[in-house]
Amino acid sequence: MTGLVRVFSLFLIILIAVGGAAALQPTEDVVLGIPANPPLTQLDERGVSGLIAETTVLVLRRMGHSIVPRKLPFARMYKWVHNGKLDVATSVLRTEKRAQMARYTNPIISEYTVVAVPKGKAFPMGSVDDLKHKRIGAIIGFSYPGVEGKGIMLIRETNYEKNLIKVAKGRLDGALISSIAGIHLAKVLGLQDQIEYLPVAVDAVPLGSALSKKVFSADDLERFNVLVRKLKSSEEWQKILTRNDAMDLVKTWPLLTE
């Protein structure tokens, strides 16, 4: 009888140990879409970097997931997270239509659309009308709801770099750029001494991540948002800002009145 008790006790110990080990294992890998949008999202030979990308990775790991990052262009990333082919998309803008197809997180960062002008050529801007009769650079395929349809002449280019160079050379009166990614690029290009920024923003662009409905529940989304709030009130957030040279870029800009 004693032998049977010992065998049964040993079986229970093994069962508990196996169960405990299983509980400690991370859940299934999640594939994370990373567009080239520094200092918000970037994936290169050094790994994942950027304010939104690093925050998303840290939070997902704290939720028990292991991460498989994949570099993707924006259009494909949106399409894939909406149809369930991708688990998580980063640096994305929530709209009511998009929110029907994936679980969009609360904003992790708010970017602003600001106006870059040649150094020493700043002009007063109290309303959108002050952009009329000026050559204003914009990006092909980008939407500017605060400006479009209001009589502003937008000269579109394929990327921020071309517009910033045109502004620096005085070939544009101004260019609409993002307050984080655009200004960061101007630093990288060494144009900071040739460009300045009007002190009010045209509009705000809240950016976060999107979770596939095939993988994540509504409860997962809520947990994600809670963990982001906790992270952003910690020293870890300050380290992320410093690591991405964004301490002076993440701020609230006053918005232009109509």
Image (cartoon, rainbow, N blue to C red):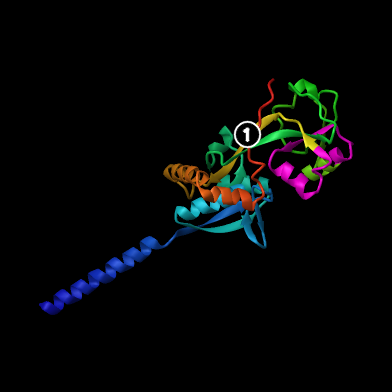
Relative to 47, does residue 133 appear above or below in the rendering?
A: above
Q: Amino acid at mark 1?
A: Thr
- For the record, the magenta segment spans 166-195
Per the image, the residue denoted by label 1 is 252
Q: Is residue 85 visible?
A: no
> Which residue is at 79% across, 36% downward?
196
Relative to 20, does residue 103 appear above or below in the rendering?
A: above
> Which residue is at 41% across, 62% downward?
25
Where does the image place residue 250, in percent across and percent down from the top left?
A: 63, 40
Relative to 106, does residue 45 appear above or below in the rendering?
A: below
Disc 1 secondary structure class: loop
Which quadrant, please, contains the N terminus?
bottom left
Depth check: give the residue in front, 242 or 117: 242
Corner quadrant of residue 132: top right
Q: Residues within 10 Å of mark 1 (few under 14, many from 20)?
A: few
Where does the image place residue 130, in percent across and percent down from the top left?
A: 79, 22
Instruction: Give the total number of marks visible in the rendering.
Output: 1
Which quadrant, please, contains the C terminus?
top right
Q: Is residue 125 visible?
A: yes
Is 173 covered by the magenta stretch? yes
Where does the image place residue 63, in percent across and percent down from the top left?
A: 45, 52
